[in-house]
Image: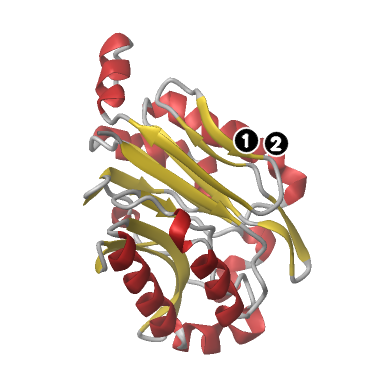
């Protein structure tokens, strides 16, 4: 039957949760039932640091929205948002499967150039793990972390099938993003989907270049720029075929 992987690349409005959720709501009918949708990093608000505490307090609205969307489409939905635990803020990826929150994965390597370490706390290395979903065995590597192959290599050792890279990646480093995401697919012999935001959000401009890649490194879908919804139908058995063809030790 195959599995559908989807990416929604769009311009995130800084601090405007309702506007960003509305954008996602508008593409609801495009999400294949039973598939997987990856949204950009901080898709609901961007890095609106002066208001991050307030935005984190509104996280339940975002979680409820993702739960409903996941339930209606019988799909796996993944995105990151600011979540507060105790007195610490985390940039956290959440995984919904058919309406249920099945996993969280906090960002471990925070991006100094965007001053993330001044506002967010890193989570433990153990947060980097394979998550069983109805769409397959997934692992999440958040934006800047794709530069560190220890994350993807660890997921590969655990048997990951699909690596997800939600991002807010600057346009001046767009070529890095294109090369790194495709390389991680080839390196780990896994499907990889990367969802970046596009256009100006606050003072920063983001570069798009979202894509879906096969374990062989083939480009299954790609969006250079602009608002884009990408979908590719995959066969998870291809993961084992590629790994058997070229055995790589991890």
Quick one: label 1, few (<14), some, or many (20+) residues within 10 Å? some
> Is 156 in front, or is 123?
156
Q: Nearer the viewer, residue 224 or 117?
A: 224
Quarter holding the C terminus is top left
Quadrant in the picture for the N terminus = top left
Q: Residue at x 59, y 37 (%)?
A: 222
Are discs 2 and 1 less than 8 Å apart at CB? yes
Find residue 61 and report its horizontal and vertical position in percent.
42, 83
Residue for badge 1: 178
| Secondary element at tag 1 | helix
Report if residue 133 is visible in the image: yes
For image coordinates 37% across by 68% down, the residue present is 69
Q: Quick check: 37 left or right of 219?
A: left
Image quarter for residue 112? Answer: bottom right
In the rendered image, the vertical position of residue 246 relative to residue 133, given as above or below = above
Horizontal and vertical percent position of residue 91: 47, 68
Give the answer, above or below, for where 157 lies relative to 82.
Answer: above
| Position of residue 216 measured from the top left corner of the image (x, y, whole percent) | 43, 20
Q: Residue at x 32, y 17 (%)?
A: 242
**Residue nearer the viewer, 62 or 24:** 24
Dot label at residue 175: 2
Q: Residue at x 52, y 74 (%)?
A: 21
Instruction: Give the side of residue 19 with respect to residue 31, left or right.
Output: right
Question: What label does residue 188 carry, if any?
Answer: none
Q: Quick check: 211 above or below 38?
A: above
Q: CA distance from mark 2 to mark 1?
A: 5 Å
Where is residue 19, by image quadrant?
bottom right
């Amino acid at each position: 039957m195959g599995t559908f992987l989807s990416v929604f690349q769009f311009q995130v409005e800084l601090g405007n949760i309702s506007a960003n959720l509305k954008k996602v709501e508008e593409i609801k009918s495009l999400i294949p039932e039973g598939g997987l949708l990856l949204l950009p990093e901080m898709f609901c608000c961007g890095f609106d640091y002066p208001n991050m505490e307030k935005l984190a307090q509104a996280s339940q609205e975002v979680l409820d929205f993702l739960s409903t969307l996941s339930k209606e489409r019988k799909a796996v939905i993944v995105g990151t948002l600011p979540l507060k635990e105790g007195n610490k803020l985390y940039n956290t990826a959440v995984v919904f499967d058919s309406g249920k929150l099945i996993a969280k994965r906090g960002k471990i390597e925070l991006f100094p150039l965007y001053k993330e370490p001044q506002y967010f706390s890193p989570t433990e290395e153990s947060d980097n793990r394979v998550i069983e979903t109805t769409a397959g065995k997934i692992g999440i590597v958040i934006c800047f972390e794709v530069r560190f192959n220890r994350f993807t290599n660890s997921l590969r050792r655990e048997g990951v099938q699909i690596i997800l890279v939600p991002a807010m990646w600057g346009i001046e480093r767009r070529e890095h993003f294109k090369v790194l995401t495709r390389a991680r697919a080839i390196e780990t012999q896994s499907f990889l989907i990367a969802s970046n935001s596009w256009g100006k959000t606050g003072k920063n401009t983001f570069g798009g270049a979202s894509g879906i890649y096969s374990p062989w490194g083939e480009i299954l879908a790609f969006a250079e720029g602009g608002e884009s919804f990408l979908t590719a139908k995959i066969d998870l058995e291809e993961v084992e075929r590629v790994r058997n063809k070229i055995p790589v030790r991890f």
